[in-house]
Image: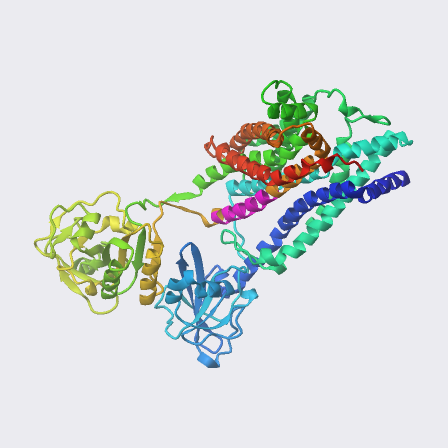
Amino acid sequence: MRGWARDMALGARFAVSGGRSGWARTLLTAVGVGLGVLVLLLAASAPRVLQAQDERVANREPSCFTAVSGCPDLEPGPETVLFRNELTRYHDADIGGASLQPDAGAETTATPPPGLDAFPSPGEMVVSPALGRMLDSDDGELLAQRLDYERVGTIGEEGLEGSGDLFFYLGSASLQEGLGANVERVDSFGGEVVTTEYGAPLMLLIVIICVALLTPIAVFIATAVRFGGERRDRRLAALRLVGADAMTARRIAAGEALVGAVAGLLLGVAALLSTREVLGSITLFGFSTFPSEITPDPSLTALILLAVPATAVAVALFALRGVAIEPMGVVRHGTVRRRRLPWRLLPFAAGLVLLMQLAGSTLSSDDDLGLAQAAVGMVLVLVGLTLLLPWLVDRLVGWMRGGPVSWQLATRRLQLRSGPAARAVSGITVAVAGATALYMLFAGVRADQTTETGRDPSQYQVEVSASVSGEVGLSLAREIDGLPGVTESFAITTGYATRPDRQAAGDGVQPAEVVVGDCAALREMARIETCANGDVFLTRDTVRPGDRLDLNADYDGPLPGESRPWTVPRSARRVAVPETIDIDHTFLQSGAVFATHGALDVGSLGDALLMSAIETDPSDRNAIEQIRNAAWERDPDIYVWEVESETLTDEFSGIQTGLLVGASGVMLLIGASLIVSTLEQLQERRRLLSVLVAFGTRRGTLGASVLWQTAIPVVLGLALAAVVGTCVGAALMATVDISVTGWLAFLPMTAVGVGVIALVTLASMPFLWRLMRPDGLRTE
């Protein structure tokens, strides 16, 4: 142990006292490792961030909302509050809120929700910081018109889901329990966090997301600790010349790698501490958090702090296994021995075996062993991919001959030593392979978590549903029809009617649905050839011409109060209803009475529901906001939503958000790490490039050769990643019994990989031109 410590300490001294080139090498290693450590620490912070968000969301909800039996019936008192959820949307952002009305008014002793010091008075509003900024911005003008209340404060951090949470509390004096679908009388806020239950496909998707996003980071860290390998080996050969044996040389190399890894750890921790404020102020795909919560889990942090240095030492020793460092030089500069394939296939084959074993059985969400097996299998396949790529590049470039000067310079360099180039792109190869498999599984699970709505967004884009009196609904429909951006709309008012004679007889006949609208709207609902104002149409045998109906009814039967008699005209005609109706909710498909406004006054309906289908100008992004404003002014309970052909489950939407956030971070890491790796390779070839320029080689030729040296391994790596990712994706889909689709999923992933490589190459060109100068011939 004393010998290990002595030799590694000597390697550490070389890492920090090797002159300018030594410091540059150590700095590049530290930056590469630091970027990976930063992402690992952010990933280790994810559990705390998600848990804190769930707790804050639960704490601002009334306590009874988490109870299985629902909110109890409470008597008004000094500690009770009327509560109603207020939900709206502005462009692509969901905005939440709540109306609050203490039963005791200003004398209340109730505790306000977290983030509030006191209940807002009627007409007053307390908003989150993000919502306040949106209301004050030029883009939020229409939202400010909708939420036109006096702002009296800002919600504290403890009452918000994240720094970008759009939320408000509104003081009210008009809430009445029982008269609104969302009004509840509560006496406290805060409850248990509701745990989301995920099915087997979603659990497998979460596991594979973690593997696919974190494995490239490990590959980048392993690549970074091998920066400056050629110069290190020449220095070790000099040490052999003065008496060091082979094992001592390897321990010294491990000490150098350890210094770079420890420096990278410190750099990663410093980067986390310095970027927390910035990260806490960013909202990405609707996700945000607070800087104080970006704190890695202690156990995961300890694992990272131990694993990164241990990995650096292991990689340094492993990298020297095939290099003969002799006193007179490094034997690697002679004829290169062909890489062997069999041992490189072992991790890859083992991973495929583990995944194929799962494909024969149906994985369940509580099968921890099966999920762990899927994760280990995925990791082994991706690790095997990094081992296969150098062999593939070595084999294929060995066959390349001829071509332009730039091509020959690139292929000869790769033939002499393809390892650094293959390692440089191994991270992007792993990322593309994992992303391809993930994309296939994601598409399959998405189809499983998608529900078809039966709506056609190409016909109309907005729907409005209002449970209001018939006159209010009709007035709202007319106002919407005249709003800017609305090109066409049609509205119907629905209700129910009973037959008093059958009701008295108790024959159990359900109330008949009544639909009132103009001729254009009714034609959308039924097959009507001729129509004029005053006409009535019947679609079911339960109602006949001349029947006397009571319109004071709902779905369950007669409503309290006086009856509202109406007689079906003798002129009513029978028409057919299509099997599907685009405007509707399902119950309208069995509508019995279709009447025009001239035949039936919507004000006589006891339980009126307005439904309006609206076509908007696609170039006017504010059209739907005008509609929402008009509806909110009448009643915040009026529903306005954009028409979609399909909907996703909330659980899948949350996973999708996490995937987008994580993938964005990994892609940034990929780009930054590739730039560092490219600069390291150029630094290693600094003297060679200067010599070639001195002999008259054109700069453009050298630039093209550097491009080819990157492009050849990239093309081979992406091709291998496409094949492997597609096979792994198919195997994963089989484990959860999902039909294998998305065979072309590698195309977008490969395109992203090519784009990242192209940007990295362009970014490295200025540094390349700087290296092609005569001072590169200097020696130190």
Relative to 313, does residue 339 appear above or below in the rendering? above
Residue 426 visible in the displayed image: no
> Could you tell whether 88 is left or right of 398 in the image?
left
Residue occupying the far left of the picture = 570
Identify the image quadrant of the C terminus: top right
| Main SS class of the magenta portion in the image | helix
Relative to 35, does residue 464 appear above or below in the rendering? below
User: Is residue 447 one of those drawn in magenta?
Assistant: no
Residue at the spot 67% in from the left edge and 27% down from the top edge: 418
Q: Position of residue 324 (x, y in %)?
A: 81, 26
Q: Quadrant of residue 276?
A: bottom right
Residue occupying the far right of the picture = 243
Q: 46 or 332, which is in the foreground? A: 332
The colour style of the image is rainbow
Q: Position of residue 304 (x, y in %)?
A: 71, 46
User: Is residue 657 one of those drawn in magenta?
Assistant: yes
> Could you tell whether 757 is left or right of 142 in the image?
right
Q: 140 or 377, which is in the foreground? A: 140
Residue occupying the far bottom of the picture = 107
Residue 248 visible in the displayed image: yes
Residue at the spot 47% in from the left edge and 34% down from the top edge: 738
Identify the image quadrant of the N terminus: top right
Q: Position of residue 554 (x, y in %)?
A: 26, 60
- Figure disc tally: 0
Residue at the spot 25% in from the left edge and 51% down from the top edge: 588
Q: 275 or 169, which is in the foreground? A: 275
Q: Quadrant of residue 256?
A: top right
> Could you tell whether 446 is left or right of 584 in the image?
right
- Range of residues picked out in magenta: 653-669
